[in-house]
């Protein structure tokens, strides 16, 4: 679905953001893109959407070179950026103007999503709060029924009840034909939705595994006495005890802790990647 | 549904689904909610629910009618108990043994406690 080959990009000379970056994403999955501030998460998503151009290499989505922004490509990709602009109109006229660009747009689904999010339909977009606008945009993006859906920090700015609503609408939107890419810092908001983890650091993709493979090979647990645990790969200690990652002998079924995994991959990249190769 | 910290989500969903069967909310030969419905209700990835269903099918608690969905198998309650017993013996019992070993408690000593417990709770 999304194929990035040998991508190099920099905003400024001698300060590369991506160097020979490779990444393959398939339909039927929800990818969680994780990375530190400034690692290039948003820039990578913008490449996928054709909003930034590779200086070297290719970014292909559904076979289209994203940078050429061909109509057949744009019809089948929707991106909800972190910062966005919405015109000073009512929701109704927004849909009348923009929905025709997406042949699979589902008006009924759009209104269901708005209802789920408790968005009043008779308001002007500019009279809404940031969180409300974001919910309109997320609803629009889901209703557009595109093959690729890219969400940059979607839960930022959402209040507590809407995070649960967000998870429900995303769970409903997954299908075998769709590829959903979500960048996030708040992994705990989404850790039951994401089925594959992509970590970007140091100008490239340093980790890309599905959650099932991760929990097959690694074990996540909380212990009070770290000395009792064998083969500790990574530990995060606090007053509540120690959150540890150990190698999984193959029989344990633990729940993934994405924050812990992220820290482990950044700090112990070599020993972690050895386990997955 | 509130998920616990440590156990794999697909197994927690299996527990939740088994509970529906044991509580008779889902009856034998009933069609259970679809993978998508469960995913939305539980706010998880449909692939995770799919894994739960495959797992429960493997233990013959539910079965699949192609194109229609999953159904509660005959004898599902019995199968669930068997599965729970297996998991208890593999996971909780070693922990329990460890505790009584560390506390110098002999198994014989516990017998009386167990009988008393059964009397006060189940008779």
Image (cartoon, coloured by chain):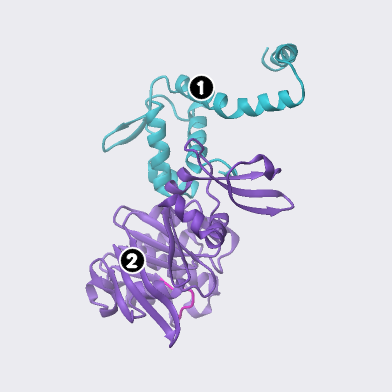
Q: Can residue A9 be found in the magenta stretch?
A: no
The chain coloured purple in the image: A
Residue A92 visible to an observer of this rendering: no
Looking at the image, which residue is at 51% across and 22% down? B81
Looking at the image, which residue is at 23% across and 76% down? A71
Can you say whether B13 is above or below A110 in the image? above
Which label sits on residue A275?
Answer: none
Which label sits on residue B81?
Answer: 1
Is A172 placed left or right of A235 in the picture?
Answer: left
Where is residue B6, by image quadrant? top right
Where is residue A161, by image quadrant? bottom right
* Residues in magenta, as a range: A80-85
Q: Mark 1: few, some, or many residues within 10 Å (few <14, many ≥20)?
A: few
Instruction: Pick whichever, A172 or A67, lies toward us.
Output: A67
Q: Disc 1 on helix, strand or loop? A: helix
Respond whether the residues carrying marks 2 and 1 are from the same subunit.
no
Looking at the image, which residue is at 43% across and 38% down? B52
Label 1: chain letter: B
Instruction: Pick whichever, B3 or A242, lies toward us.
Output: A242
**Dominant secondary structure, magenta:** loop
Q: In the picture, which quadrant includes the N terminus of chain A?
A: bottom left
Residue A24 visible to an observer of this rendering: yes
Can you say whether B47 is above or below A15 in the image? above
The chain coloured cyan in the image: B
Q: Disc 2 on helix, strand or loop? A: loop
Looking at the image, which residue is at 26% across and 35% down? B66
Residue linked to disc 2: A144
């Amino acid at each position: 679905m999304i194929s990035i080959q040998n991508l190099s990009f920099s905003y400024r000379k001698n300060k590369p953001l991506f160097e020979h970056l490779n990444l393959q994403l398939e339909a039927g999955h929800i990818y969680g893109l994780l990375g530190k501030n400034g690692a290039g998460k948003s820039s990578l998503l913008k490449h996928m959407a054709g909003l930034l151009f590779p200086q070297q290499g290719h970014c292909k989505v559904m076979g289209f070179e994203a940078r050429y922004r061909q109509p057949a490509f744009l019809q089948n990709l929707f991106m909800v950026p972190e910062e966005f602009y919405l015109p000073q109109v009512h929701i109704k006229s927004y849909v009348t103007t923009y929905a025709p660009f997406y042949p699979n747009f589902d008006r009924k689904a759009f209104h269901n999503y708005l209802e789920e999010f408790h968005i009043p339909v008779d308001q002007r977009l500019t009279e809404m709060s940031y969180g409300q606008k974001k919910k309109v945009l997320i609803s629009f993006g889901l209703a557009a029924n595109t093959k690729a859906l890219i969400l940059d920090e979607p839960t930022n700015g959402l209040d507590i009840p809407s995070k649960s609503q967000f998870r429900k609408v995303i769970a409903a939107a997954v299908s075998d034909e769709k590829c959903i890419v979500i960048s996030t810092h708040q992994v705990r908001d989404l850790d039951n939705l994401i089925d594959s983890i992509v970590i970007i650091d140091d100008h490239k993709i340093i980790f890309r595994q599905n959650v099932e493979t991760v929990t097959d090979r690694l074990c996540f647990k909380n212990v009070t006495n770290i000395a009792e645990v064998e083969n500790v790969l990574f530990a995060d200690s606090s007053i509540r005890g120690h959150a540890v990652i150990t190698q999984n002998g193959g029989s344990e079924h633990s729940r993934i802790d994405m924050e812990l995994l992220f820290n482990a991959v950044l700090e112990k990249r070599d020993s972690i990647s050895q386990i997955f190769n | 549904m509130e998920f616990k910290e440590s156990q794999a989500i697909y197994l927690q969903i299996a527990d939740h689904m088994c509970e529906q069967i044991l509580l008779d909310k889902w009856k034998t030969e009933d069609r259970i909610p679809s993978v998508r419905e469960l995913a939305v209700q539980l706010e998880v990835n449909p692939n995770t629910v799919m894994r739960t269903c495959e797992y429960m099918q493997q233990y013959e608690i539910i079965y699949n009618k192609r194109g229609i969905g999953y159904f509660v198998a005959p004898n599902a309650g019995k199968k669930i108990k068997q599965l729970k017993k297996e998991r208890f013996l593999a996971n909780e019992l070693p922990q329990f043994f460890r505790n009584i070993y560390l506390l110098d408690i002999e198994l014989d000593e516990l017998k009386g406690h167990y009988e008393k417990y059964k009397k006060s709770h189940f008779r």
